[in-house]
Image: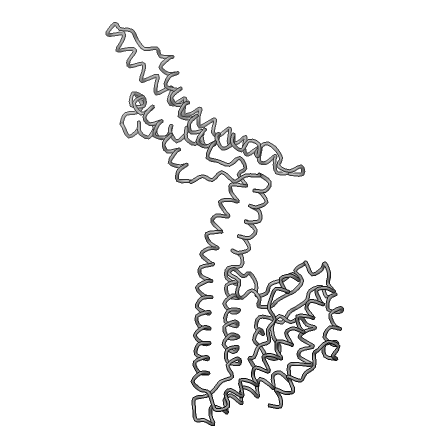
Amino acid sequence: MKTVVDYVNLNVSDGSPLLTALLGSAKAEATAEVIGLTGAGNLYNARQPGLLTQGMAAWFAKSIAASRVAAIAEMKNAFEADSRDNGNASGIYLENVCDSARQKTVNASIEKAAAFSDKHKAEVVDHEQTLESYKSLRSKMGREPVRTKKWLYVFALLGIVLLEAFINFESFMKVPYITSPFLATGATVAVGLAVGFSAHIHGVVFRQWAFLFRPQESAESGVENRRNDALRRLAIGSVLLSIALLMVGGARYYYLREYIVEASILGVAAPSMFGGIIFMLLGNVVAYIVGLLVAYVMHDPNPTFAEQDQKLRKTSERMEALKKQRTLVQQDLAHGLSADIKAAVNQDASARGPRFGELREWADRIVNKDQEMVGVLIEYRQALLQEMGSRAKGRIFRYPGGAHDILLPISDHIMLTGDEYASLQIALGYDI
C-alpha cells in the first residue's frame, strides 16, 4: 500500500511548505471580481472536487490530486483482487462505488435542471418580477389589495339587469311600436345592460378617482393619459344611463297614457303622468345606484395593485405546478441513488475477501487524511473571506451547476455570497 502511505504522509500541518503555498494565494485571489468555483459536476471527483476556488483547485491539482488518486486506485484494485482470490463475487471499494453513483445522479440532476431552465425560465423570471412588484406596492400602500371573485361581481351586475327587467318589462309591453313580447324583452334587456354597464363604469372610476386624476409620483408623466381615459369612461357611462332613462321614460309615458284615457272614460281620477314617470325613473336610478355601490366596493382604489395581485396569484399557481413536476423528478433521482447505494452496500457485504478487515483499515487511513485535507481547504476559505472583507457580502462566488437541486432554477449556475459559500460542506470525492 505504498501509494496510500505516500498520500497519508503528505505534510499539510501548520508551517509546512504545502500549507504555506496554499494560504499564500488567498490575498491575490481575494481581489478577483468574480471567483469561480469548481462545479457540482465535480462534487464526487477524486482529482478535482467541487466547491473549490481556483486557488484551491490549482493547489489541490498540483500537490494533492495525483497522490490521492493513486491511493484510491490502489485501494479499488486491492478490494477487487481480494474477492477474486477467494473465488467470490467481485468485491468493491465501497466509497468509490457510492461516489460514482452519487456523481451519476448529480450529473442527471444538472441535465434535468438545465432542461427545465431552458423551457420555463421566462415564466419563473416573470413570477419573481411580479412578486417583487407586488411586495413593493403592498409596502407602499400599507394594506392588502381588495380581492374580488369575478363570478360574484358578474352575478351581482346580472342581478341589477334582472331588477331592471322587473321594473320595466310591463311598461315596454304598452309601447305601440313594440308589437311582440320578444321586442319588449329585448328592449328591457338593453335598458338593464345599459344601466348595469354605466353603474360599473362610474363605480370603478369613482373608486379609483385618486389614482386616475392625481399623479402617484412627483415625476410621473402618465397621469394626463389616465385622466383623459377616465373622463371618456365617465362620458360613455353617462350616455348609456341617459339613453336607458329616456327609453324608460318613454315606455312609462305610453303605459300611463292608456290608464289616463281609461280613467277619463270611466270618470274616475286619472293617475299623474309626471308623477308616474318620475316614480318609474326613480326605480331605475335606485337600481343604478345599487350597481354603482357594488362596483365601488368590489374594486381596489389602485388598479395596478389589483392587477399585480391577480397576476401574482396566477403565476404562483403555475409555480406550484412546476414545483410539483420538479419534486417528482428529484424524488425519482433520489430513489434511484438510494437503490444504487443499497446495492453497493449489499455487494460489499456479500463479496468480502480474506483481507477485507485489513483493507478497511487502509481505507480508513485515506478517510482520516481526507478530513485533514478538508480542514486545510476550509482554513483557506476562511482566510480568503477574511481578505475579501465587506466584498464577501456580495454575490461574488460563481458555482457552476449549483442550481441543479433548486426547485425553480433559471440557469445552470448560482451566485453565492461569502456566508452562503462558507455554509457549504467541502468534501473530497472518491470517483476516479
- Residue 63, image x and y in percent? 69, 81
Residues 202 and 55: in front is 55
The image quadrant where one finds the N terminus is: bottom right
Q: Is residue 411 above or below residue 431?
A: above
Q: Name the outermost residue toward the top.
A: 267
Q: Decide if residue 226 is on the left or right side of residue 249.
A: right
- Residue 379, image x and y in percent? 68, 70
Q: Residue at x 64, y 81 (%)?
A: 65
Image quarter for residue 138? top right
By what rule are the colours in the image chosen?
one colour
Residues 397 and 192: in front is 397
Q: Decide if residue 224 is on the left or right side of residue 118.
A: right
- Residue 376, image x and y in percent? 67, 74
Q: Name the outermost residue toward the left.
A: 266
- Residue 5, image x and y in percent? 63, 87
Q: Decide if residue 96 is on the left or right side of residue 10.
A: left
Image quarter for residue 198? top left
The image quadrant where one finds the C terminus is: bottom right
> How many numbered marks, from 0 up?
0
Residues 416 and 385: in front is 385
Q: Is residue 340 above or below residue 411?
A: below
Q: Is residue 197 above or below residue 131?
A: above
Q: Is residue 387 above or below residue 2?
A: above
Residues 63 and 179: in front is 63
Q: Residue at x 43, y 68 (%)?
A: 332
